[in-house]
Image: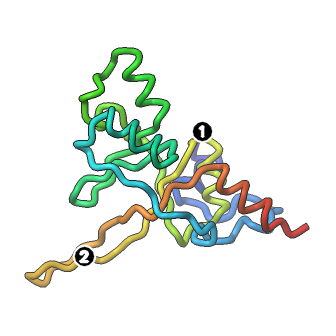
Amino acid sequence: SKFVNDKWMIKNGFLNDAQEHKPWWWNIKVQKLNLSAPLILLPEVSCQKAIEILQEKGYDQAPVVAESGLILGMVTLSNTLSSVLDGNVEFSDPVTKVIYDQFSKIGLEDSLGKLSCILENDHFAIVVHEQMQCSGNGSSSMKQMVFGVVTATDLLTFVSRNDKK
């Protein structure tokens, strides 16, 4: 069962350390990856425009975030193209019709070990940062801001560049 699976427990924040013999990078924080700022798409962007933007900017995927800051999901170039070519969506449809709404989030303070467990099952994770937002009437709330998108390639590049053999 998933409740006795250490990797599932780490991914979902119930366990901190699952490996007895952790690699040197296991406890390093995600913020050390030095991720570049992500390209963000608004939900009303059309599939055609999303394809054009992703190709022009050289991205494979981008988070879709509402004006309010709510993270709606992830749009990928391959899924958007295949959905249009299969006739499941039109070029004019909004990207919300092709987003992956099942995605993993990870914080800047989380470990690369936790990220590694997430990336064993997911192609990417959205890196988020909690930020306090205050309104004019004095109320405040915590909002999640998209800080980046991380893939297994990003983790592998970091480990290989900094390998401490």
Residue 151 falls left or right of residue 158: left
- Name the residue carrying label 1: 1
Q: Which residue is found at the position 54% from the left and 59% from the top?
A: 14
In space, the residues marked 1 and 2 are separated at their CA atoms by: 39 Å
Determine whether 7 is above or below 46 in the image: below
- How many callouts does the rendering have? 2
Determine whether 143 is above or below 104 in the image: below
Q: Quadrant of the N terminus?
A: top right
Question: In the image, residue 106 lies at what x, y percent?
Answer: 50, 60
Question: In the image, residue 82 lies at what x, y percent?
Answer: 45, 23
Question: In the image, residue 122 lies at what x, y percent?
Answer: 56, 42
- Name the residue carrying label 2: 133
Farthest front residue in view: 56
The type of residue carrying mark 2 is Gln
Categorize mark 2 by other alpha carbons within 10 Å: few (<14), some (14-19), many (20+).
few
Snapshot colouring: rainbow
| Label 2 SS | strand
- What number is the disc on residue 15? none
The type of residue carrying mark 1 is Ser
